Image: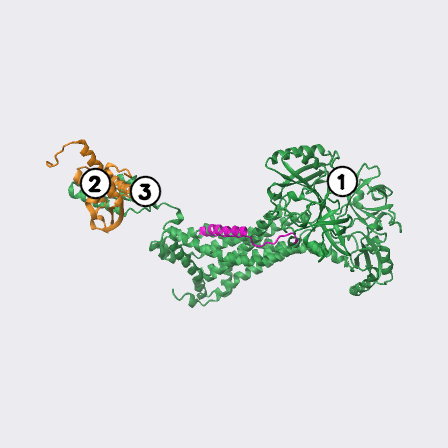
């Protein structure tokens, strides 16, 4: 009894001490007790003993010894030398289980490469405009217009806002930028297209665009600054300063300075800078004028410390309320420089923009690929527990504690992650080129996706955090293994819940893979449908020739002699592709207006394109010099408030201050591409606006026709002959479909690879575990096929569940998304769903059977030898 | 005089010095108990030893094990030069005070 009490008292002391070294104290206790026994009765000795033990419980000595041992959980008992050894052991065990290591590394590398791509984009976008020394203080005014048709956000701002900004406290400098400075720049017979800004004089105070030579603050009205790159193109070896260039349609300018080429990562891009010469009458209008009037007109300002964003916003709102009209509300807002490349989606933006929504979608997609790879790593590591249990058991028996084993496995995962990262980086450099091709405009906007120091740091931190987080699960699992069980080789059946988690993860990956594959097929189908869609006009056998400066009539006369040419018409734009030629139409009383598109055509254009008139007549021939008539489409009729097509005939419309009579109504046709609905359009008849000849030809020998036309062209003009088939132009307009297919296809490839790798690991593990079972079954006469079925059955089930979830979800998502991507869309047929499912089953089935077949064919004599 | 030395601390320190090579928990305890005819607890003793180590007056190392200790090692304590000079400082202070106090105590009849 008293012995048990003493033991309990000592055990409590040991427990209180934890991992603090109290060997000497325990020795002293025992020695003193022996002393007490030799000098007095047992009960007295016991009393003294308890006194000693109790006095130690809360003693300063014990506390201090514990304190000296208390440090971070992970740094217990570790020294640098230990890390070296952990590292060595990690490498050895990774080499030993080569197959799993390679699979883990490949899977993780694939997952990481996409995440790297995403991080690279973010890092690149965040670098934009950083070279301005006033970066933190530059803002611009943005505009929101709301009318009955909806809401539109613009990066440009009405002229009238200047009055408000100029005297506002806290604003140092207001700069207007007018992007209408674009066109053909001509010097000494050489023509180059350029664009630029008319700017206020404070431009160079606010922005950092340094001057190479000359004067940046020109006193002469028609002076212009030109960037070095464009100057060398235009002037070659000549000194550009003081030279006179002519810019269509703005007239002659004198070059007063050369600007250094500005960094590509700037949201402002320009070749020319000229002093602002805006129309001041717009500034003092009581009401703001509406969007097209301030198109390309941007207002930037630089604030100082006293500028309060909240107060400014309040005042700005008040100001815009006062200046708006009830029917069409204009709300001004402002945007700091760091929000310009990546923020609100704005129309009429002067530079490249990445909207947050698509970046978020991309982030989710890359996570959807990275996460399964990480899960696979954790689940594969735990699957290996059986193989590694002995090693852990021995380590524990010779005194390895939980922390040490934990650390060992963490270091293993860090090694795996770093190697995968290196591979991922190599993969990233490949997909970067591919990706930049997909985002063709991005490369011209300065998105380089090259590595910077900050990006390197982000990546490194990312790797360390990820490998720690992912490594924690298997490391904790291993650290908990009981040495006795491990050495007896009886870890027992893995817990039910863990198997459930693994199955859920695998199902999730199948769901994801089948989703991606089905998505690719759905997009392909939509592309097919779009290309076969009846656009409402003739598109075959039509050639468009860029008129350049040849008079339409001359060309018509010249090609009229060719027998292959059926008809020659003229127009201002190519139809069916990207089309934007906005115009505002009023009725003759100016009481109603409609913003629509316009197209200038010659009278035989309708025949060339086989466009049908549903009411009225075509243009009268020979009226192209003096416009009197106009044709409208059916949408225009209904939108302008006429009940039927014939009732609009004879109606007078005011367009560009001209009074035109509606002479006919054309059946609706898709003049813009299929992403947009058919909007109202007016067809006008003015030769001045013709930029291209539209030829309908009868021959099938296209190349010979082009040769003949080229001969004809050479007699008319010195310029290069530029002609394209209308069908080719239309194909080009749907190129974005291809980019989307490439992008989704690429992502699905990665997702499938990752899940197949995970699947492979799981199958290999299962097959190894059941090796002996398979052997015994074979001895009893099981056939190879029945064993293959037995081993593959579980995975087949997961695949079926994954498909049952993935296909409907993808279907629903595209059903929802397609009408948003493109105005025209057709229902998704069963074909892409079936094809996608089939492909997944083929791939995953191949993965599973590759392992199960070889396992089923093994000689039972080999597998059961040691039994 | 650096570092405050409590009465019990001084006593323990002196005992360590007296035990020279064999100063560890139990031996210090029994010596003090025998000489002073008072019982001290092991907890109090070890706490004081810990403090002395922290103050830098003593150092310890693990030494040999004996049977009556259940095969556990002893923690042998030893004075540092700081410990010695601290003891010397206290002795000198006392001597000076004794001398100045002109108290006559006959030590011979102990």
Q: Tell me the chain of label 2.
A: A
Q: Do the residues labelled 3 and 1 touch (CB within 8 Å)?
A: no
Q: Is residue A763 left or right of residue A675?
A: left
The answer to which of marks 3 and 1 sits earlier in the sequence is: 3
Q: Quadrant of residue B33?
A: top left
Q: Can residue A774 be seen in this view?
A: yes
Q: Quadrant of residue A728?
A: bottom right
**Is residue A460 part of the magenta span, yes or no?**
yes
Tell me the quadrant of the picture where the C terminus of chain A can be found.
bottom left
At label 1, counting other C-alpha atoms closer than 10 Å, the crowd grade (few under 14, some 14-19, many 20 or more) is few
Query: Which residue is most to the left?
Result: B109
Residues at marks 1 and 2 on the same chain: yes
Residue stretch in magenta: A444-473
The secondary structure making up most of the magenta span is helix
Camera-side residue of B24 and A54: B24
- Colour assignment, chain A: green
**Is residue A208 part of the magenta span, yes or no?**
no
Residue A749 x/y as whole percent: 58, 57
Q: Tell me the chain of label 3.
A: A
Disc 1: which residue: A279
Residues at marks 2 and 3 on the same chain: yes
Disc 3: which residue: A64
Real-space Cα distance between discs 1 and 2? 106 Å
What kind of element bears circle 1? Answer: loop
Q: The orange chain is which one?
A: B
Real-space Cα distance between discs 2 and 3? 27 Å
Disc 2: which residue: A46
Q: In which quarter of the image is residue A395?
A: bottom left
Residue A739 x/y as whole percent: 65, 55
């Amino acid at each position: 009894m008293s012995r048990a009490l003493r033991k309990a008292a000592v055990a409590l002391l040991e427990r209180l001490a934890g991992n603090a070294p109290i060997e000497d104290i325990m020795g002293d206790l025992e020695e003193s007790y022996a002393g007490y026994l030799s000098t007095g009765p047992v009960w007295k000795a016991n009393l003294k003993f308890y006194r000693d033990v109790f006095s130690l419980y809360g003693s300063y000595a014990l506390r201090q010894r514990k304190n000296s041992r208390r440090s971070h959980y992970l740094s217990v008992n570790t020294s640098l030398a230990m890390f070296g050894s952990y590292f060595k052991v990690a490498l050895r065990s990774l080499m030993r289980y080569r197959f799993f290591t390679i699979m883990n590394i490949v899977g993780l590398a694939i997952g990481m490469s996409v995440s790297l791509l995403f991080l690279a984009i973010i890092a690149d976008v965040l670098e934009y405009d950083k070279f301005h020394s006033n970066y933190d203080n530059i803002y611009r005014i943005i505009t929101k217009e709301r009318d009955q048709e909806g809401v539109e956000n613009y990066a440009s701002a009405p002229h009238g806002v200047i009055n408000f900004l100029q005297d506002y406290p806290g604003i140092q400098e207001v700069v207007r930028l007018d992007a209408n400075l674009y066109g053909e720049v001509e010097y000494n017979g050489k023509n180059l297209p350029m664009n630029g800004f008319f700017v206020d004089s404070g431009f160079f105070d606010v922005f950092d665009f340094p001057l190479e030579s000359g004067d940046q603050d020109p006193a002469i009205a028609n002076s212009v600054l030109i960037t070095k790159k464009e100057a060398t193109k235009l002037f070659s070896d000549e000194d550009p300063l003081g030279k006179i260039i002519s810019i269509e349609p703005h007239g002659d300018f004198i070059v007063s300075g050369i600007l250094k080429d500005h960094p590509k990562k700037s949201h402002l891009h320009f070749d020319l800078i000229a002093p602002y010469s805006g129309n001041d009458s717009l500034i003092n209008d009581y009401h703001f004028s509406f969007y097209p009037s301030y198109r390309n007109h941007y207002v930037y300002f630089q604030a100082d410390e006293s500028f309060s964003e909240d107060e400014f916003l309040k005042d700005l709102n008040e100001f815009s309320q006062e200046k708006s009209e009830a029917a069409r509300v204009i709300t001004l807002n402002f945007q700091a420089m760091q929000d310009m490349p990546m923020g609100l989606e704005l129309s009429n933006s002067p530079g490249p923009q990445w909207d947050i929504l698509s970046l978020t979608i991309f982030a989710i997609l890359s996570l959807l690929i990275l996460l399964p790879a990480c899960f696979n790593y954790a689940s594969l590591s735990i699957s290996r527990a059986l193989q590694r249990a002995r090693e852990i058991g021995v380590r524990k028996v010779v005194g390895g504690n939980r922390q040490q084993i934990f650390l060992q496995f963490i270091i293993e995962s860090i090694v795996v992650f770093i190697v995968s990262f290196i591979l991922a980086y190599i993969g990233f450099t490949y997909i970067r080129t591919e990706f930049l091709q997909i985002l063709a405009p991005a490369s011209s906007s300065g998105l380089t996706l090259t590595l910077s120091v900050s990006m390197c740091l982000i990546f490194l931190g990312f790797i360390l955090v990820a490998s720690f987080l992912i490594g924690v699960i298997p490391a904790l699992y291993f650290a908990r293994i009981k040495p006795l069980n491990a050495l007896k080789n009886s870890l027992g059946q893995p817990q039910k819940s863990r198997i459930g988690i693994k199955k859920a993860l695998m199902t999730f990956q199948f769901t994801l893979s089948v989703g991606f594959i089905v998505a690719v097929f759905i997009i392909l189908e939509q592309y097919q449908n779009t290309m076969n869609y009846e656009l409402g006009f003739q598109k075959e056998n039509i050639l468009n020739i860029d008129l350049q400066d040849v008079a339409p009539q001359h060309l018509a006369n010249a090609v009229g002699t060719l027998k292959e040419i059926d008809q020659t018409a003229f127009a201002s734009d190519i139809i069916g592709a990207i089309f934007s030629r906005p115009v505002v139409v009023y009725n003759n009383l100016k009481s109603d207006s409609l913003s629509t598109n316009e197209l200038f055509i010659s009278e035989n254009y309708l025949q060339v394109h086989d466009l049908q008139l549903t009411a009225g007549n075509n243009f009268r021939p020979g009226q192209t010099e003096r416009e009197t008539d106009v044709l409208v489409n059916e949408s225009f009729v209904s939108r302008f408030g006429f009940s039927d097509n014939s009732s609009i005939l004879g109606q007078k419309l005011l367009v560009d201050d001209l009074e035109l009579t509606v002479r006919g109504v054309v059946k609706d046709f898709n003049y813009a591409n299929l992403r947009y609905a058919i909007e109202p359009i007016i067809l006008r008849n003015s030769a001045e606006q013709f930029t291209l000849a539209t030829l309908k030809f009868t021959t099938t020998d296209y190349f010979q026709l082009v040769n003949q036309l080229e001969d004809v062209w050479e007699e008319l003009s010195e310029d290069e002959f530029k002609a394209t088939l209308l069908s080719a132009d239309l194909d080009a307009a749907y190129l974005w479909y291809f980019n989307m297919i490439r992008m989704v296809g690429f992502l699905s490839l990665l997702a499938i690879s990752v899940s197949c790798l995970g699947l492979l690991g799981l199958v290999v593990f299962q097959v190894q575990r059941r090796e002996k079972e398979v052997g015994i079954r074979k001895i009893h006469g099981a056939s190879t096929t029945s064993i293959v079925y037995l081993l593959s059955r579980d995975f087949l089930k997961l695949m079926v569940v994954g498909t049952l979830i993935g296909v409907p979800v993808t279907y629903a998502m595209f059903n929802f998304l397609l009408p948003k991507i493109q105005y025209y869309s057709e229902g998704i047929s069963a074909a892409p769903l079936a094809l996608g499912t089939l492909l997944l089953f083929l791939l995953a089935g191949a993965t599973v059977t590759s392992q199960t077949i070889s396992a089923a064919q093994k000689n039972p004599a080999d597998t059961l030898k040691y039994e | 005089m650096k570092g405050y030395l409590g009465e019990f601390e001084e006593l323990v320190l002196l005992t360590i010095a007296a035990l020279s090579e064999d100063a560890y928990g139990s031996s210090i305890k029994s010596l003090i108990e025998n000489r002073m005819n008072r019982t001290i607890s092991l907890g109090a003793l070890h706490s004081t030893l810990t403090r002395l180590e922290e103050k830098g007056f003593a150092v310890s190392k693990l030494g040999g094990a004996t049977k009556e200790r259940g095969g556990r090692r002893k923690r042998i304590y030893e004075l540092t030069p700081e410990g010695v000079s601290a003891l010397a400082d206290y002795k000198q202070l006392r001597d000076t005070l004794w001398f100045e106090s002109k108290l006559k105590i006959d030590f011979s009849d102990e």
